[in-house]
Amino acid sequence: MNYISYVGIPFAVSKEQAFNSVCKVFELTPIQLRSRSRLRHIIEAKAVLCYILHKKQGLSSTATGEYLKLNHATVLHHCKNVANWIEVDKNFNDKFKQLRVTYN
């Protein structure tokens, strides 16, 4: 059983719903999430959104990148980082679990 099935986060939502949920959980405005900022909390939120759109909803890395104005390689890098952060960073893991509440 993988981590996502254990947490039970339903990912059958639209891009806009996922975007709004990530903004809510990470306490960011849509402008901040779409910004080119390199602040850690903004990067974590972008990474989670990339992970949801690419890995769980099946969008290609190119389509995900176009939606967030990122390079496809950056999307893949974010997805890899999220998998590592879930296992290592408890605060990140808690925020990731909070997404489940916002979808229900």
Image (cartoon, rainbow, N blue to C red):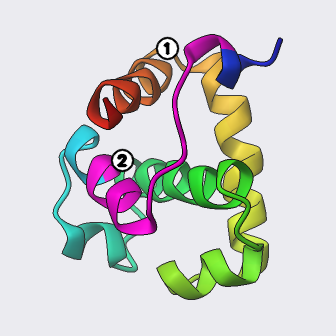
Q: Position of residue 21 (x, y in %)?
A: 30, 48
Q: Is residue 17 magenta?
A: yes
- Residue, x 36% and y 61% (percent of image)? 19
As shown in the figure, which amino acid type bears the numbered disc 2? His
Q: Are marks 2 and 1 in contact (CB under 8 Å)?
A: no
Label 2: which residue?
41
- Residue, x 66% and y 24% (percent of image)? 4
Under circle 2, the secondary element is helix
Separation of marks 2 and 1 at Cα, in angstroms: 14 Å
- Magenta stretch? 6-22
Q: Earlier in the sequence, mark 2 or mark 1?
A: 2
As shown in the figure, which amino acid type bears the numbered disc 1? Lys
Quarter containing the N terminus: top right
Under circle 1, the secondary element is helix
- Residue, x 70% and y 71% (percent of image)? 74
Whether residue 59 sits left or right of residue 103 in the image: it is right
- Residue, x 75% and y 73% (percent of image)? 61
Classify mark 2: residues with Cα within 10 Å, few (<14), some (14-19) or many (20+).
some
Q: Position of residue 98 (x, y in %)?
A: 34, 25
Label 1: which residue?
90
State which quadrant residue 6 falls in: top right
